[in-house]
Amino acid sequence: MVKENNTSISICILRLSSIGDVTHILPIIATLQKSYKNCDITWIIGKTEYQLVKELDDINFIVIDKNKTIDSLLGMHIFSKKMKFDIVFHMQKSLRSKLAGKIIKGKINITFNDIDTEKSHVLEHFFSFLDKVNISSRVLDWKTDKILAMNNKYLSKLNFNKPKSFVAMNPFTSNRVNNYREWDYDNYLFIADYLKNEYSIDTVFLGKTSAKKKLQFEESIKNKPNVISMINKTSLGQMLCILNISKFYIGPDSGSLHMANMLKVPVIGLYATSNPKRTGPYNNLNYTVDKYEEALNKFSNKNISNVKWGERVREKDAMKLITLDDVKLMIKKVIS
């Protein structure tokens, strides 16, 4: 049970990106709002990530455009002269966030240097910030009701012929260097056919990717009536609404995986290059296909017990350790 404090308090949260981490901030805000009856929260957030949470009118947002960092920081400097905070949570380590942290100061300032980030999930890392201000409660509320209510009206604008029953999948991940988190695209098509043949469930593909990848992928599904492509066709809010009406979700570590998780939709996470105990779908770790330890041993010649928490496997073949049978087994587990 959360104990309310009637003290009026102003709080700033500095977390610019990424989509997955932004979803993890929402329970932190919910906990703060339950803990402090009179709580004014300002969130410094990235422009892209803001699109997911902009409907939350109980939060003040300062939006940073990474393409206009200097202008954004100048505006923040002007804002800082007017607004003083009791607590500032510096919840990111990037250069842009460090620069922002130089400008925004509170009476109390808490950074990653002040908390323990070993052997726990990223969401627990963020909750550790609250421990430093004597809040030990955990409110696992992702504030989705308001976000969905505002975005559902935009869903009708999409050319989306909703199947009677469908699974959502996103085979794509961000284009970072050595970011080997994508499972073979043909595997997703096999699983889509398996879902249709075994369970009469269709598949909707979501996500953002390059025009070239989109064209290649959609060419491979053009003769599959059980598959609908919404790739590069949705806003973050619209994607959230589609995820909300799916039976479950399948995909690697990505923003959409954590969006499905925040909706408490069953999530089958595909993990080999990162540790799902740290970055997996928080509500669905029991459905995760976890090949991380095997990948560490095979490609890095390391043991999970003696590697740095959060270390990644930078090997393009690591995701091949995840088999079709692994995923089919998890599908049976979810459906049963």
Image: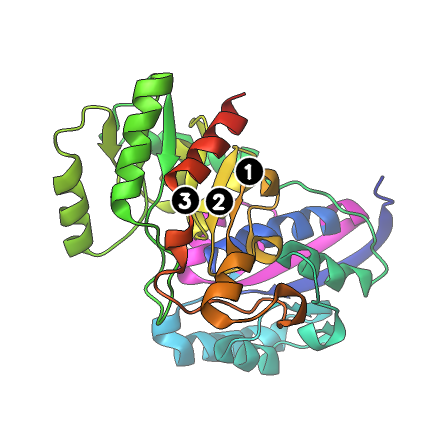
Q: Amino acid at mark 1?
A: Tyr
**Viewer-side residue, 248 vs 162:** 248
Q: Quadrant of residue 134?
A: bottom right
Q: Quadrant of residue 104?
A: bottom right
**Viewer-side residue, 19 vs 11:** 19
**Viewer-side residue, 249 vs 255:** 249
Mark 1 and mark 2 residues within 8 Å of each other at the beta carbon: yes
Residue located beneath label 2 in the image: 269
Q: Is residue 208 visible?
A: yes
* SS type, badge 1: helix
- Give the side of residue 15 with respect to residue 187, left or right: right
- Give the side of residue 42 with respect to residue 248, left or right: right
Say if 146 sits above or below 27 in the image. above
Residue located beneath label 1 in the image: 287
Residue located beneath label 3 in the image: 251
Mark 2 and mark 3 residues within 8 Å of each other at the beta carbon: yes
Q: Quadrant of the C terminus?
A: top right
Q: Earlier in the sequence, mark 1 or mark 2?
A: 2
The residue shown at (60%, 83%) is 102
The residue shown at (42%, 52%) is 321
Mark 1 and mark 3 residues within 8 Å of each other at the beta carbon: no
Residue 314: in magenta span: no
- What are the residue bounds of the magenta stretch? 33-61
* SS type, badge 3: strand
Residue 90 screen position, x and y as percent: 64, 71
Residue 54: in magenta span: yes
Give the CA separation, mark 2 to mark 3: 5 Å
Q: Earlier in the sequence, mark 1 or mark 3?
A: 3
